[in-house]
Each structure stands twice: as structure tokens, then as C-alpha cells.
Amino acid sequence: MMSERAIIVTGASRGIGAAISEHLAQAGFIVGCLSRSGELPRREQASAIVRSRWIGLAADVTNPATVRNAIEHVAARGTIVGLVNNAGLHTEARSEELAISDWNALLAVNATSVLACSQSVYPHLVRHRSGLIVNIGSFFDKLGVKRNLAYCASKAAVAAMTRVLAVEWAAAGIRVLNVAPGYIVTDLNRAQMMEGPLKAYLSKRIPAGEPGSADDVAHLVASFFDIEVPFLTGETIYIDGAQGVAH
């Protein structure tokens, strides 16, 4: 009997990670939903079938041992074929006031964890000579955004790691992609995005006039696992409504 295919998603309990977990489960994958709390994704509309494919697991992405333990738990249920590095942290500070401790904490979650989680899943992917890692970056990786030095640097690092891992691991049949969203409405930022100064700003800056949704990102990520394109690897795919290229 063929084993079910499983994908690990970090930061899966809320926001974009929860949406990705739902769309992957809808596509028939077992989804190891990693988060600090270990809670299942907060997607009230998710069907019973989708929920049956979720495995909620507590793991700290800055602690590789907990990630490895969670991955082994998922591997007991299905063959691991992919990883979505979605866990992230966002803080703001003026660059001249940015505490080194805050810099280190953000880089640990946004960048170092991408390496640690990818290393942890590597033995499972290389064993089968195939697999896909999707990193969730940001279009801030190519922008200079005030008060976002650490965040911009971390997402630029994610894009760089995507390229290097894609080159190193291609011979093992492992592909690596980076999905870089622009402004996305989630359950965490809905009020801020949909009213007030930020809404007014985005209506002018985004050519379509409004931000994207977590489902927009989830559809894209799930499509990479659904339709295999072996020659597509090492690339950053921006999903920002053309804001990053609008003049």
C-alpha cells in the first residue's frame, strides 16, 4: 500500500500558514502543522476531511531538536515530500535604535529557522530523491522600508538561501522556491489593513487598489505541490499585486 504524502508547514496555526495548511489538505496531503502552541490551524470553514489530514504539533523553529521531533512524528503517518517555511516575526524600530537582541531574535525566526527546518527535512527528501521546499519571503526583500531594517534583511536572506539551497540540492532531486507576498490581509491584521491610514495608503500604492488575501498566497503555494515543474527551482515569485514594480 502506497504511503500518503505529507508536507510540513511551520507557523501553521494562524494567518497565511493556516490558509496554506488548509489548501494542502484539500489537495490530499497530510499536513504537519507546526507552531509554538501546537494548535490546529484557525480555519473555521475547514471541512472534517481537511481537519482529519492535519497533525497539530508544538515546535519552536529556533530549536532544531523540537522541529526534528515533530517531523519524525509526521513521517510515521506519511512520506514527507515537502516543507513550507512560513513561520515569521515582524517588529519595527528606527535603525539607530534597533537593539541587537531584537535583531538577533527576528533573524533567528525569519532566516535561521529556514536553514534549520530545511536541514531537518533534508534526510526525508533525499531518501526519495525528490521533494519541494517553499519558503515564504516578502517583497520587502528588494525594498528599503523605514523602521524595517531587520525584517528587510531577514527576507533578503531567505531569498539568498533559496537560491543556494536550490543549487546545492538539485542533484538530490530537491527543488526550492521562495514566495514573496506583498501586503496580505490575515486574521491578525484585518482591522489595520481595511481601515484608516494604511488602507488609504494601499489603495494608492497597489495598482489593484487593495491588498491580497491569505488564500491568494495559499493557492499559489499549493499549486507548486499539485503541478510538478521539475525545472522550476531557485526562483523568487512575487505575489504583491504589482506594487513592487509600480512607479
Image: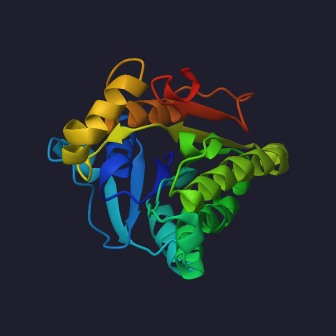
Residue 180 location in percent, x, y? 54, 39
Of the pair 139 and 81, the residue shown nearer to us: 139
Of the pair 114 and 246, the residue shown nearer to us: 246
Q: In the rendered view, how is the structure colored?
A: rainbow
Of the pair 175 and 216, the residue shown nearer to us: 216
Q: Is residue 161 left or right of residue 192?
A: right
Question: Could you say which quadrant of the image residue 28 lies in?
Answer: top left
Residue 169 location in percent, x, y? 79, 50
State which quarter of the image contains the C terminus: top right
Is residue 13 something that shows in the picture? Answer: yes
Is residue 108 something that shows in the picture? Answer: no
Question: Could you say which quadrant of the image residue 173 lies in?
Answer: top right
Q: Please report the residue visible at 61 percent of the width from the left and 58 percent of the height from the top.
A: 154
The residue lying furthest to the front in this view is 96
Instruction: State whether residue 50 is above or below residue 229.
Output: below
Q: Please report the residue visible at 21 percent of the width from the left and 40 percent of the height from the top.
A: 196
Residue 23 location in percent, x, y? 35, 38
Of the pair 110 and 199, the residue shown nearer to us: 199
Instruction: State whether residue 205 is above or below residue 71.
Output: above
Instruction: State whether residue 127 is above or below residue 245.
Output: below
